[in-house]
Image (tube, grey):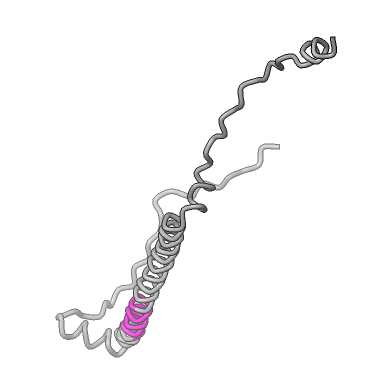
């Protein structure tokens, strides 16, 4: 009788099937040392390439800026020399010499220019 009760008490328990754990890629890489070293080298090379390209772009920009500043200096000097030449040509003595060299004569008659019609003036109609 005791054996019978014991047999009744032990029943098979229905178990759920175990879920298979998904293998996480990061965990797998961490466990594998060679893969970890390769990923670290890849990350370092990526950061290094970004740094080198940024440094190269900064150097190129600096070179172009320096070149533009030197060209601007030359253009300013040229502008100043042209202004001095223009001022020299605007002197009345130089204008008179130019007129004599081109067979121009001074005018004896004074002519006044007036418009044919009176200028239109806006009027307030209020």
Residue found 34% across the figure and 81% down from its top: 70
Image coordinates for residue 123, horizontal then vertical, percent: 62, 43
Whether residue 60 is visible to the viewer of this picture, yes or no, is yes
Residue extending furthest bottom? 93
Quarter placement of the N terminus: top right
Image coordinates for residue 7, horizontal then vertical, percent: 77, 13
Number of numbered discs on residues? 0
Residue 23 in the image: above or below residue 15: below
Q: Is 78 in the magenta?
A: yes
For the stretch drawn in magenta, the main secondary structure is helix
Residue 23 in the image: above or below residue 35: above
Whether residue 86 is visible to the viewer of this picture, yes or no, is no
Residue found 50% across the figure and 44% down from its top: 25
Residue 104 in the image: above or below residue 56: below
For residue 108, side relative to residue 59 (left or right): left
Asked where in the image residue 8 lies, by quadrant, the reply is top right
Residue range corresponding to the magenta coloring: 67-80
Asked where in the image residue 12 lies, by quadrant, the reply is top right
For residue 89, side relative to residue 53 (left or right): left
In the image, 46 versus 17, the foreground residue is 17
In the image, 18 versus 86, the foreground residue is 18
For residue 14, side relative to residue 26 (left or right): right
Image coordinates for residue 48, horizontal then vertical, percent: 42, 66
In the image, 41 versus 48, the foreground residue is 41
Quarter placement of the C terminus: top right
Q: Is 69 in the magenta?
A: yes
Asked where in the image residue 61 lies, by quadrant, the reply is bottom left
For residue 55, side relative to residue 19 (left or right): left
């Amino acid at each position: 009788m005791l054996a019978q009760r014991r047999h009744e008490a032990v029943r098979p328990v229905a178990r759920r099937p175990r879920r298979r754990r998904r293998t996480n890629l990061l965990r797998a890489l961490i466990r594998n040392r060679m893969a970890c070293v390769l990923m670290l080298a890849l990350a370092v090379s990526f950061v290094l390439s970004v740094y080198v390209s940024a440094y190269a772009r900064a150097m190129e920009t600096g070179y172009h800026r320096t070149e533009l500043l030197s060209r601007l200096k030359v253009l300013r000097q040229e502008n100043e020399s042209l202004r001095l030449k223009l001022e020299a040509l605007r002197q009345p003595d130089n204008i008179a010499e130019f007129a004599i060299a081109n067979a121009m004569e001074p005018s004896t008659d004074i002519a006044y220019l007036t418009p044919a019609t009176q200028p239109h003036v806006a009027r307030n109609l209020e």
